[in-house]
Image (tube, grey):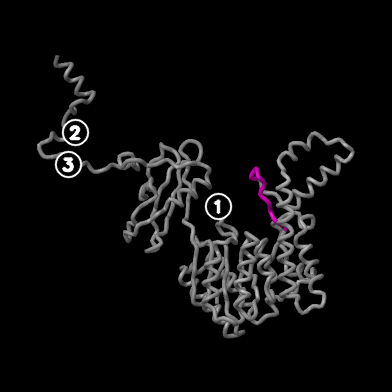
């Protein structure tokens, strides 16, 4: 099977890449007797929630992959994700563990935040030298919409209050404290506790279950991964070597007979995500792909974003529909594109399927922070090219042969005659 540089050069179609993934999964099953489930969310596509994040919306898709795999078998779950909801990660892990005899998580590239919580729930963990997990300290959204590390919020308030023990509070701290409510502090503390609890329980019942001091070791590992003061950034990468130092029993690709297969599978996933695919849920027999429509923001007409061009993929015939959405009333329709329907309803020009595409408009408006401008009647939609003249009705004067009745030129001509 080709690796990354060969796949990039080959420019395979999605169907060919899918066929290669199936072949790689089959190799693992034949070599190790383990079925493969692929759970991928593209960490590099910046989309409004749920986007590529681990979310409750994933549950039906994961469940279908789980049900397509023989109950009681041994499975390898391949995860590539930047994280999401810890609660959703817990549910996904439980779905897998309830059905199968042994669960091994595979991280060919990266599994951060809630994805780290997910892969630490299994019986074993397989990683490459270049792959990584991440800190599990939760990120907390305050009432004002700002996202801050939960522990930084709590520790910051504690330090401010410590300085005020003498009875005087620095006036500069007052605006900061006004943005933090007691509910914020409680929610931040509970989010940190949840992350640590899930990792502790997963390790003690999984990878560390044969150790006499499993709970103590699991608590130590969870504390280290959840310490914001240690990592300083939620985006830091935690390598396999660092995990081994903490006491996580990681197996390296180089020590597993399927390591090369999973390295090739990781390369295939990276190239697949260069398309409009956002999430992949796959087994040998199931292929569930969530796609986002490719959006190109057009050049501004004056100042600000003027328009967006959308290649919307019809869910029925899979053919692209070139649409044009405008954010300024002076933007004209781009040649070769269709005006985005004001109602959000349209028929596919290829297969005549009825389409509801208003969510695409809402997504673009949210991303750009602007409301779209309707195209209005067909008379307003023009791309600047000449349109063929419609023939005049029978008996009517031919257009262009003289001033039309009621026009300014006709009034001037009548005045000259008088």
Q: Secondary structure at mark 3?
A: loop
Within 10 Å of disc 1 (Cα), the crowding (few <14, some 14-19, many 20+) is few
Where does the image place residue 55, in percent across and percent down from the top left? 58, 61
Q: Distance from label 3 to label 2 (Cα)?
A: 11 Å
The residue sitting at 71% across, 65% down in the picture is 198
Q: Secondary structure at mark 1?
A: loop
Specify which label sits upstream in the sequence, 3 or 1.
1
Q: Distance from label 2 to label 1 (Cα)?
A: 52 Å
Residue 391, disc: 3
Query: For this rendering, which residue is in front, 70 or 8?
Result: 70
Q: Distance from label 3 to label 1 (Cα)?
A: 49 Å
Within 10 Å of disc 2 (Cα), the crowding (few <14, some 14-19, many 20+) is few
Q: Which residue is mark 2?
A: 400
Query: For this rendering, which residue is in front, 165 or 385?
Result: 165
The residue sitting at 64% across, 67% down in the picture is 109
Q: Secondary structure at mark 2?
A: loop
What segment carries the magenta color? Answer: 137-145
């Amino acid at each position: 099977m080709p690796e990354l540089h060969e796949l990039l050069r080959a420019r395979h179609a999605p169907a060919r890449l899918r066929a290669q993934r199936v072949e790689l999964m089959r190799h693992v099953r034949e070599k190790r007797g383990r079925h493969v489930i692929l759970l991928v969310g593209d960490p590099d596509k910046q989309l409004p929630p749920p986007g590529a994040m681990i979310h409750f919306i994933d549950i039906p898709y994961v469940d279908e992959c789980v049900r397509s795999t023989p109950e009681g078998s041994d499975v390898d779950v391949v995860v590539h994700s930047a994280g999401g909801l810890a609660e959703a990660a817990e549910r996904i892990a439980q779905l897998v563990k309830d059905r199968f005899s042994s669960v091994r998580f595979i991280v060919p590239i990266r599994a951060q935040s809630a994805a780290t919580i997910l892969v630490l729930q299994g019986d074993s963990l397989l990683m490459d030298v270049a792959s990584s997990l991440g800190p599990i300290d939760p990120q907390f959204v305050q009432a004002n919409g700002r996202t801050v590390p939960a522990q930084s919020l709590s520790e910051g308030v504690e330090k401010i209050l410590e300085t005020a023990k003498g009875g005087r509070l620095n006036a500069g701290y007052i605006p900061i404290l006004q943005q933090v409510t007691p509910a914020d502090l409680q929610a931040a503390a509970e989010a940190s506790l949840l992350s640590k609890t899930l990792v502790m329980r997963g390790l003690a019942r999984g990878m560390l279950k044969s150790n006499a001091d499993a709970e103590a070791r699991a608590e130590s590992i969870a504390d280290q991964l959840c310490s914001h003061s240690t990592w300083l950034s939620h985006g830091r990468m935690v390598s396999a070597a660092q995990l081994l130092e903490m006491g996580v029993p990681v197996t390296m690709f180089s020590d597993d007979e399927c390591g090369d297969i999973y390295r090739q599978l990781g390369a295939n996933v990276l190239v697949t995500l260069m398309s409009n695919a956002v999430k992949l849920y796959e087994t040998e027999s199931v292929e569930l792909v969530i796609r986002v429509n490719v959006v190109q923001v057009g050049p501004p007409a004056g100042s600000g974003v003027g328009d967006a061009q959308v290649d919307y993929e019809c869910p029925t015939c899979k053919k692209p529909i070139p649409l044009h959405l405008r954010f300024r009333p002076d933007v004209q329709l781009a040649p070769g594109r269709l005006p985005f329907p004001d109602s959000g309803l349209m028929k596919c020009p290829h297969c005549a399927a009825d389409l509801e595409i208003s969510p695409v408009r809402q997504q673009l408006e949210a991303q750009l922070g602007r409301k779209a401008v309707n195209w209005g009647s067909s008379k307003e939609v023009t791309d600047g090219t000449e349109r063929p003249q419609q023939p005049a009705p029978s008996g009517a004067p031919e257009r262009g042969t003289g001033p039309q009745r009621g026009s300014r030129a006709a009034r001037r001509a009548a005045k000259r005659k008088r």
